[in-house]
Image: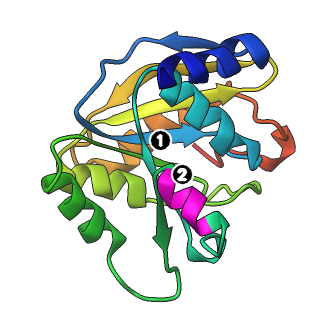
Amino acid sequence: MKKSFYSFIFYRLLGWKTRLEVPNYDKCVICAAPHTSNWDLFIGKLFYGSLRRKACFMMKKEWFFFPLGIFFKAIGGIPVNRDKRTSMVDQMAERFANSTQFHLAITPEGTRKANPEWKKGFYYIALKAQVPIVLIGVDYPSKTIYATKVVIPTGDFEKEMREIKLYFKAFRGKHPANFTIGDV
């Protein structure tokens, strides 16, 4: 029922398409980019729901005020306190270890503005949890979401981050000026 609802909105009402070539892992980190608009969350949730999959996502705790906090938690939101020096890598790796199924979606830019210095946490979470990184590219001009590449982290951060950034080079967000892969 939910899949039909998500599919109807995503494909029929909004006119999006998908190119899906990655397996449905029990556990994975989803690296989704570009993230240039608040609409990205909505589009991403519809896409993933249309596949009958559920992904959690981390979001700054300031968004978890009443009544939005209830909504965000219901759709998989995990509040993040950026002020405290707690290891999100350790916390998320532990959550992976204690789950039979867990998909964690992270936008590597860490903001909706152009940021050439991508956050590294998504990579280190996947490395520590020993799970694949599924790359999901959002392309607004063609209204297509691409899930066509998986990176298995080995610890060679520079090489693998370059590979990840180059994957996203061709995608255009809702506001293209707000996205950059930086120097690669």
Q: Amino acid at mark 2?
A: Pro
Residue 160, above or below 92: above
When asked about the image quadrant of residue 112, the answer is bottom right
The residue tagged 2 is 108
Crowd around label 2: few <14 · some 14–19 · many ≥20 (10 Å): many
Residue numbers of the magenta segment: 69-74
> What residue type is disc 1 on?
Cys
Q: From the top left corner, tell me how far across and down residue 135 is, in percent.
A: 46, 32
Of 130 and 169, the residue lying toward us: 130
Spatial separation of the CA atoms under disc 2 and disc 1: 7 Å
Can I make out residue 83 in this image? yes
Q: Report if residue 72 lies within the magenta region.
A: yes
- In terms of secondary structure, what is the magenta stretch mainly? helix
Q: Which residue does the numbered mark 1 point to in the structure image?
A: 31
* Residue at the image position 77 percent from the left and 19 percent from the top: 14
Whether residue 77 sits left or right of residue 97 in the image: it is right
- Secondary structure of the residue carrying numbered label 2: loop
Residue furthest to the bottom in view is 84
Q: Secondary structure at mark 1?
A: strand
**Residues at circles 2 and 1 in contact by the CB criterion of under 8 Å:** yes
Which residue occupies the foreground of this view, 179 or 45? 45
Q: Is residue 118 shown to the viewer in this render?
A: no
* Up/down of 4 relative to 82, above or below: above
**Res. 61 image quadrant:** bottom right
Asked whether 148 or 1 is in front, the reply is 1
Between discs 2 and 1, the one toward the N terminus = 1
Q: How many marks?
A: 2
Query: What percent of the width, then of the height, locates residue 163?
Result: 45, 34
The residue at the point 65 percent across, 70 percent down is 63
Is residue 122 found inside the magenta-colored segment of the image? no
| Number of residues whose C-alpha sits closer than 10 Å to that of mark 1, classed few (under 14), some (14–19) or many (20 or more) | many
